[in-house]
């Protein structure tokens, strides 16, 4: 959910930040500790980019809310990130090409409708149809018939349903892929694969303001834009899956991480999973064991608009020079106070396939060599570089540090350009209205090396995905295809690593850091944890008093 966190693009470096004023079940804020039936809390969030529709949510803020509202076929262990069955009773295939999925009993949507095989098939057909312009469309490209529903720009779909999806009965459906893909089961925990009720198809836009999910929480009123999103416990959620312990959660929407942190310190909100850089030197002493610090899947990049501004960023040598002029260690220690670790691969250290030092020379700080390479490659037009970033995610300090390093080490004029919100920057990039370099972040959609490659850098992800740089490399595409069809996971992993090597050579983005989870919570709550996706495990949170 790309960026901020699907896959996701991450607003504040990884996953979503939650928030809101504390409130009881009656809606008042002073009696949360004694509120009956579990009580309510408030957490930090950034404004989601789109309506809250699973197939169209590829960023961390919306994904955080949907994680509370929906339950998918597969979930991921909070501690290990290993996939585990959730709504699915079984997901099996004799050849990694034709899959049979059987559902458990007991799951219903928040309007009482039963979750069936048709609920998944209808949702996936909607997401796969390019007429619906869903950001999750690329995730359905492996299913037979996807090319008929998404034939490409200036073409119309020639079918209404994916021919690879077949409903057998209420609890069973089959999925036929265009080619074997051994990681398909792992993939199914991603947001785009959530089920949808019949009500969605009546009015998708209205649904996005007040979605009807099948998860442990349900909406409590409509989304109040730039203010808050309130959810409450869904009492009909299956006990075997673990009902939410809290009665309600308010996601309070913040533009400033500093403001959210100050609210945390006064217990006006109870949890934040994204801390401002200003807090990093003191948060451990202030919150003690209530400060969470552990590896997370997010990777922070400097991206390049290769397709829209080739005159400035089209040469790999220029991109490599910029990479070598960035002191990742200094940024991690000085700006982030250790809450980030220098990146040395395009693949996260949490995922099988990561190789320590894979970036090689390109990831090694060498200002003299960087200047030499930059000069030999002819520099950039007007000797000027612009770095775009979203101002609502705590990125100002590190982007300005990168700007100063490039100015000093390459002798170029560098301007840091803030966008008010992450969604506005994504929109400007997607609509090709911005042609400067840009800050970007990725948190995995599912724990696989492939997820750090295809959704960000493949050709299909340019129009229907998150390839905001417009990067295309035929060798990279071929290796991805070969890896998908590998007979064993080991063979596939080696091919994904070869595709990773192509990125190291081309540097369409520059990996700058990988994330450490830095969250904190007040004495009012307990059982707080975050997963590798940067999402809070809200269903297990309890009031401490």
Image: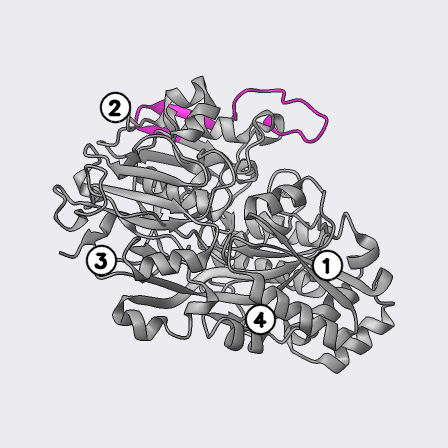
Q: Position of residue 264 (x, y in %)?
A: 32, 58
Q: Disc 1 designates what residue?
A: 386
Residue appearing at x 19%, y 32% in the figure: 236
Residue appearing at x 49%, y 39% in the figure: 57
Instruction: Report, in whole angstroms, how far the alpha carbon at label 4 lies from the one at label 3.
Output: 33 Å
Residue 281 placement, left or right of 416: left
Quarter holding residue 74: top left
Instruction: Report, in whole angstroms, how far the alpha carbon at label 4 lies from the one at label 1.
Output: 24 Å
Kindly state the secondary structure of the residue where label 2 is placed.
Answer: loop
Examine the rendered structure and indicate whether residue 159 appears above or below residue 495: above
The mark that comes first in sequence, 4 or 1, is 4
Q: Disc 3 designates what residue?
A: 527
Residue 485 appears in view: no
Instruction: For label 1, count other residues whose C-alpha is less than 10 Å away and answer few (under 14), some (14-19) or many (20+).
Output: some
Q: Disc 4 designates what residue?
A: 344
Q: Pick the residue in front: 451 or 147.
A: 451
């Amino acid at each position: 959910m790309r960026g901020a966190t699907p896959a996701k693009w991450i607003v504040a470096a990884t996953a979503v930040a939650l928030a809101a004023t504390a409130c009881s079940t009656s809606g008042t804020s002073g009696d949360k500790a004694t509120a009956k039936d579990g009580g309510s809390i408030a957490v930090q969030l950034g404004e989601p980019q789109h309506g809250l529709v699973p197939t169209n949510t590829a960023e961390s803020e919306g994904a955080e809310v949907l994680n509370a509202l929906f339950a998918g076929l597969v979930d991921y262990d909070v501690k290990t990130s290993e996939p585990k069955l959730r709504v699915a009773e079984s997901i099996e295939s004799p050849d990694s090409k034709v899959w049979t999925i059987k559902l458990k009993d007991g799951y219903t949507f928040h309007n009482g409708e039963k979750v069936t095989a048709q609920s998944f098939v209808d949702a996936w057909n909607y997401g796969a149809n390019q007429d619906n312009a869903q950001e999750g469309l690329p995730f359905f490209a492996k299913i037979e018939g996807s090319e008929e529903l998404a034939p490409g720009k200036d073409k119309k779909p020639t079918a209404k349903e994916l021919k690879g999806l077949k409903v057998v009965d209420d609890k069973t459906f089959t999925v036929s892929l265009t080619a074997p893909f051994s990681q398909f089961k792992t993939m199914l925990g991603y947001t785009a694969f959530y089920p949808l009720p019949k009500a969605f198809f009546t009015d998708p836009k209205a649904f996005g303001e007040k979605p009807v999910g099948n998860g442990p929480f349900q909406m409590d009123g409509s989304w109040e834009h730039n203010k808050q999103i309130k959810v409450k416990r869904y009492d009909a959620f299956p006990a075997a899956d673990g009902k939410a312990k809290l009665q309600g959660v308010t996601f309070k929407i913040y533009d400033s991480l500093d403001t959210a942190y100050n609210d945390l310190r006064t217990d006006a909100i109870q949890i934040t999973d994204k801390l401002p850089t200003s807090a990093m030197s003191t948060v451990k002493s202030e919150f003690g064991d209530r400060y969470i610090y552990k590896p997370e899947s997010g990777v922070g990049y400097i991206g390049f608009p290769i397709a829209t501004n080739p005159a400035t960023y089209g040469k790999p040598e220029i991109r490599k020079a910029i990479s070598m002029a960035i002191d990742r260690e200094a940024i991690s220690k000085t700006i982030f106070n250790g809450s980030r670790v220098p990146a040395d691969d395009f693949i996260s250290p949490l995922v099988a396939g990561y190789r320590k030092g894979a970036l090689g020379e390109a990831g090694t700080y060498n200002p003299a060599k960087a200047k030499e390479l930059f000069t030999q490659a002819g520099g950039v037009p007007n000797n000027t570089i612009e770095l775009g970033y979203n101002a609502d995610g705590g990125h100002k300090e590190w982007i300005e540090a990168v700007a100063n390093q490039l100015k000093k080490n390459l002798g170029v004029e560098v301007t840091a350009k803030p966008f008010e919100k992450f969604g506005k920057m994504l929109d400007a990039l997607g609509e090709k209205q911005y042609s400067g370099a840009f800050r970007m972040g990725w948190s995995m959609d599912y724990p696989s090396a492939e997820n750090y490659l295809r959704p960000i850098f493949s050709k299909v992800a340019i129009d229907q995905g998150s390839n905001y740089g417009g990067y295309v490399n035929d060798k990279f595409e071929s290796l991805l295809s070969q890896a998908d069809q590998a007979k064993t996971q080991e063979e596939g992993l080696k091919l994904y690593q070869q595709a990773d090597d192509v990125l190291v050579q081309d540097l369409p983005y520059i990996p700058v850091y990988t994330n450490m989870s830095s969250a904190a919570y007040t004495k009012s709550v307990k059982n707080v944890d975050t997963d590798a996706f940067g999402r809070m495990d809200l269903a297990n949170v309890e009031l401490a008093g």
